[in-house]
Amino acid sequence: MNIDDIVVCPKCSGALKKNADKYHCTKCEAKYKTIEGIPVLIDYDKIPKHLIQQIEYFSNESKDLGADYKIEPWQKSYVDSFVANTNIKKKKSALIIDCGTGTGYIAIELAKLGYNVLATDLTLDYLIRLNHNAKVLGLNDKIMTLCCNAQSLPIKDRAADYFVSNAVLEHLPEDVKAAKELTRVVTDDGQIMVTVPHKLKYISPLLWLVNIIHDKRIGHLRRYDFETLSELFNNFDPITTIYKGHTAKVFLVLLNMIFKNIDKEKIEHIDEKNNNKKIGANNITMFFKKKSF
Ligand SMILES: [Zn+2]
C-alpha cells in the first residue's frame, strides 16, 4: 500500500511525480510539499476562508488532546456501527478512506482490525499526531495520511472501497461538491458511512440554544436529516440509518460532568436502544451503497 499510487494533483487531477520529499504535477507543473512525510496536497488559491479558519480552530484543538491515543465508548460505537452495517468483513484487503479523521480513532480502530486506511484531514496537526500514534501501536503499515480539502480530493477515481465521512459535511461551505468528490473516489460496489448533526426540529427545544452555540463555535454551517442526506447522495441507495445522541443521553452526559459517577459505556447502551428513533436524536448516520446502473 503506497500513497503515491493513489494521489493526483488537487488543481488539475494530473499525475504527480515525487522527488525526494516534494511532489510536482506532470500536467500543470504545480508543486506540493510533504511535512513529516505527509503529502500536503492543497490548492491554497481556491480554499474558502471558512476552511482556513477551521484549520486554525482545529490546530488549537489538536494541541489540547495530548499525544497519547485513547478512545471513548461513544467513539467505539461509531466504529462498531461501521463494521456491523457495511460488508467490510467480507473484504479484508479493502481500502477505507477516513475523511476528516480528526483524533484518528476510526482509522486506528479499523487498522487494528486489519483493514487498510487512508486518513485525510485539512488540519495537518491531527495527521502528525495520528502518525505518531499509529507508530506507537504498530499500525503504521495499515494507515496512510494525506492533508487535503474534502471539497477537492487529490485522489484517483475509484481508489477506495469504503468512505467514512464522520462529522465533516457540516463544516464545508460546498457540501454538494464534497459529495460529488466522495462519489468519484469510491469503487462501483463501494459503500459509505456518513455522520452529520441532525436538524434542530427533531431535537428537544431545551437543547436548541446549547446546540446553536456549539455549532457556531465549532464552525458547523448546517444540519441534515434523512431527506437532505438522501438527496445529497442520490447516486447511492440507503442501506441503514442510525440515530445517536438522544435527549436522554445528552442529559446523562451533562449530569456526568458534575457527578462523574455514571459509567460511560452504560450511557452508550442506553443510547443504542434508541438507534432507530429519529425524534430526539442529535446525530444521524447513514450507510449507503453505490447505485448500479
Ligand atoms: Zn496539476
Image (spheres, grey):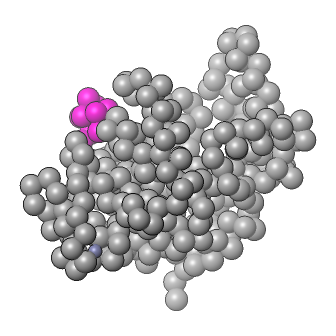
Position of 207 with respect to 75 (left or right) is right
Give residue 46's position: percent from left, percent from top. Answer: 45, 66
Q: Which residue is at the front of the view, 221 or 112?
A: 221
Residue 225 position (above or below residue 114): below
Does the image show residue 237? Answer: no
User: 196 or 88: which is nearer to us?
Assistant: 196
Farthest residue toward the bottom?
A: 293
The residue that appears at 18% across and 76% down in the rendered structure is 26
**Image check: 259 left or right of 115?**
right
Q: Position of residue 188 (x, y in %)?
A: 43, 78
Q: Is residue 236 visible?
A: yes
Above or below residue 282? Residue 236 is: below
Decide whether the magenta segment is chiefly helix, strand or loop: helix
Query: Ligand 1 shows up in which quadrant of the image?
Result: bottom left
Q: Which x, y percent locates residue 242? A: 68, 52
x 26%, y 29%: residue:
136
Residue 58 screen position, x and y as percent = 50, 39
Q: Residue at x 64, y 71 (%)?
A: 232
Q: Residue furthest left?
A: 20
- What residue occupies the far right of the structure in this picture? 205
Q: Is residue 30 left or right of residue 54?
A: left
Picture quadrant of residue 107: top left
What's drawn in magenta, residue-wise?
130-140
